[in-house]
Image (tube, rainbow, N blue to C red):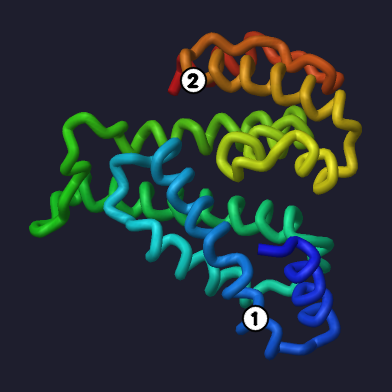
């Protein structure tokens, strides 16, 4: 797969050439499958969604959007973001189905798989981090879920490589603490989280 070829097709789409979608899916399908498998493995092993279904739904959402895609890395970053939102929506529907006890619903059939609540907790954590430090939240999403390299993240975000690596280290530590119910300060973002988050987490 040639990154330059992907960029050319994205530029064609930007000019209004819808025929470029056909060539684009051939160029990026393997990447989208890799992203889908990564999401399902790292974020939501308990989901009943399969990689092919996740790719299909993400592709439909991508086609409904018309952002100014810069290149392959930017395109895949958006695709990864949409996949995460799809999984969160799926988890919420599954949780509602479980609570309503609808006959025929298969709820987390694999006893070793993470609970759907874990998926939503990660999403909530990233949402809270985005409120405090949007840049660090984006780095986590692109690195952990999207599988982008630090160099690709720097390209997508426009941040220096050193900054990306520092954001990744700090944000990962913050998210880990958040999920354990032990919030810590957000470093390098000019924001100090402390009791407010701790109180809201313990109250919930």
On residue 179, which mark appears? 2
Picture layout, residue 109 above or below residue 162: below
Q: Could you say whether the residue bearing mark 2 is in a helix, strand or loop?
A: helix
**The residue positioned farthest toward the left in the image shown:** 103
Which quadrant would residue 168 be assigned to in this image? top right
Q: Nearer the viewer, residue 41 or 47?
A: 41
Quadrant of the drawing holding the N terminus: bottom right
Tell me if residue 37 comes above or below residue 66 in the rendering: above
Identify which residue is drawn at 74% across, 28% down.
132
Of mark 1 and mark 2, the one earlier in the sequence is 1
Residue 23's disc is: 1
Residue 178, given in percent of the width and then of the height, sits at: 55, 18
| Quarter of the image with the C terminus in it | top left
The mark closer to the camera, 1 or 2, is: 1
Query: Which residue is pictured at 47% across the width and 53% down the height?
Result: 36
Pinpoint residue 121: horizontal percent, then vertical percent. 46, 31
113 and 127: which is toward the camera: 113
Mark 2 Cα within 10 Å, few/some/many (few <14, many 20+)?
some
Residue 131, quarter of picture: top right
87 and 37: which is toward the camera: 37
**Marks 1 and 2, Cα distance to the nearest angstrom?**
41 Å
Q: Position of residue 182 (x, y in %)?
A: 54, 9
| Residue 184 in view of the camera | yes
Q: Tag 1: Cα neighbours inside 10 Å, few (<14), some, or many (≥20)?
A: few
Image position of 121 with respect to 189: above or below: below
Identify the residue shown where x is 63% and y is 70%: 27
Q: In the rendered view, does 15 fall on the left or right side of 145?
A: right
Residue 67 seen from this side: no
Q: Position of residue 13 (x, y in %)?
A: 77, 80
Disc on res. 40: none
């Amino acid at each position: 797969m040639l990154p330059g070829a992907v960029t050319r097709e994205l530029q064609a789409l930007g000019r209004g050439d819808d025929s470029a979608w056909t060539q684009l899916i051939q160029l990026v399908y393997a990447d989208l499958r890799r992203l889908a498998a990564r999401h399902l493995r790292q974020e939501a092993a308990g989901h009943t969604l399969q990689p092919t279904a996740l790719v299909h739904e993400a592709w439909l959402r991508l086609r409904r959007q018309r952002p100014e895609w810069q290149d392959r890395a930017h395109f895949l970053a958006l695709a990864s973001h949409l996949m995460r939102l799809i999984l969160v929506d799926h988890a919420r529907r599954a949780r509602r189905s479980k609570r309503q006890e609808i006959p025929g619903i298969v709820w987390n059939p694999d006893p070793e798989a993470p609970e759907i609540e874990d998926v939503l907790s990660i999403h909530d954590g990233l949402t809270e981090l985005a409120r405090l430090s949007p840049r660090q939240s984006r780095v986590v999403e692109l690195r952990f879920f999207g599988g982008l390299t630090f160099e690709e993240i720097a390209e997508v975000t426009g941040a220096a490589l050193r900054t990306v690596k520092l954001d990744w280290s700090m944000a990962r530590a913050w998210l880990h603490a958040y999920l354990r119910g032990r919030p810590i300060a957000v470093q390098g973002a000019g924001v100090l989280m402390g009791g407010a988050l701790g109180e809201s987490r313990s109250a919930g």
